[in-house]
Structures are given as structure tokens and as C-alpha cells.
Amino acid sequence: MSKRKEIKLDTSEVNQDILLFCAFRYALGRRTYVVGTIANIIKANWDTMHCSRRAFYKKEIKEAVDKGWAGSELIDVPEWKSILELPD
């Protein structure tokens, strides 16, 4: 029987940014409850994000909304659009 290696979660600021980025990429375009959760986390951390990261989120969201790839028009799109309304 093999032993499993314990994996510790690194909660450093850099890895949290990477985790949020991955969660965002997963959520954008899906019709799932996680869209609201991810949008809320992005909004809660907006003021501490580097301006290049904020610009990236806005660019990706705008493109997905414009192409009709941002999920449900009734539920998901308003969540994503709320991020577009945040200051740069």
C-alpha cells in the first residue's frame, strides 16, 4: 500500500491571486452558483488588486459578455457586469 503525500495549501498572497484567477477562468461562461461567489470575491478584493489584474478581469468579462459567452443572461451576466462598473 502506498502512502499519500500530504499537500499543504500555500495561502500566500501570490497563490491566492493564482487561485482566484483559476476560479474566475472556471466560472466565466458557466451557468452555476459559483459565478456569484467568484464575482463577490473579486469585488471584495478589487481595491487591493494590481491595476493590471483589474484590467485583465474587465477585458475578459467584457469580451465574454459581448460575445454572449458569459453564462445566463438573467443571473450570471449581471454578476459579471457589476465588476465592469468598478473603478479602474
Image (cartoon, helix red, strand yellow):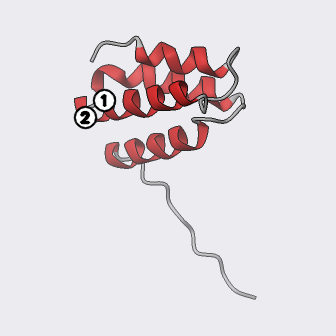
Mark 1 and mark 2: span between their CA atoms? 5 Å
- The residue singled out by tag 2 in the image is 52
Specify the quadrant of the image occupied by residue 77.
top right
Q: Is residue 32 above or below residue 77?
A: below
Nearest the eye: 18 or 81: 81
Residue that lies at the very extreme toward the right in this rendered image: 1
Helix, strand or loop at label 2? It is: helix
Residue that lies at the very extreme toward the front in this rendered image: 67
Q: In this image, 31 relative to 88: left or right?
A: right
The x and y percentages for residue 13 are 33, 42
Residue type at tag 1:
Ala
Badge 2 crowding class, 10 Å Cα cut-off, few under 14, some 14 to 19, many 20 or more, is few
Quadrant position of the N terminus in the picture: bottom right
Residue plotted at (64% across, 22% down)? 76
Mark identifier at residue 55: 1
Q: In this image, 14 relative to 43: left or right?
A: left
Q: In this image, 11 relative to 1: left or right?
A: left
Residue plotted at (67% across, 18% down)? 73
Q: In this image, 81 relative to 74: left or right?
A: left
Tell me whether the residue at label 1 lies in contact with that at label 2, contact meaning CB atoms closer than 8 angstroms.
yes
The x and y percentages for residue 47 are 30, 20
Residue plotted at (34% across, 35% down)? 56
Specify the quadrant of the image occupied by residue 17.
top left
Residue that lies at the very extreme toward the bottom in this rendered image: 1
Badge 1 crowding class, 10 Å Cα cut-off, few under 14, some 14 to 19, many 20 or more, is some
Residue type at tag 2:
Ser
Quadrant position of the C terminus in the picture: top left
The x and y percentages for residue 62 are 45, 26
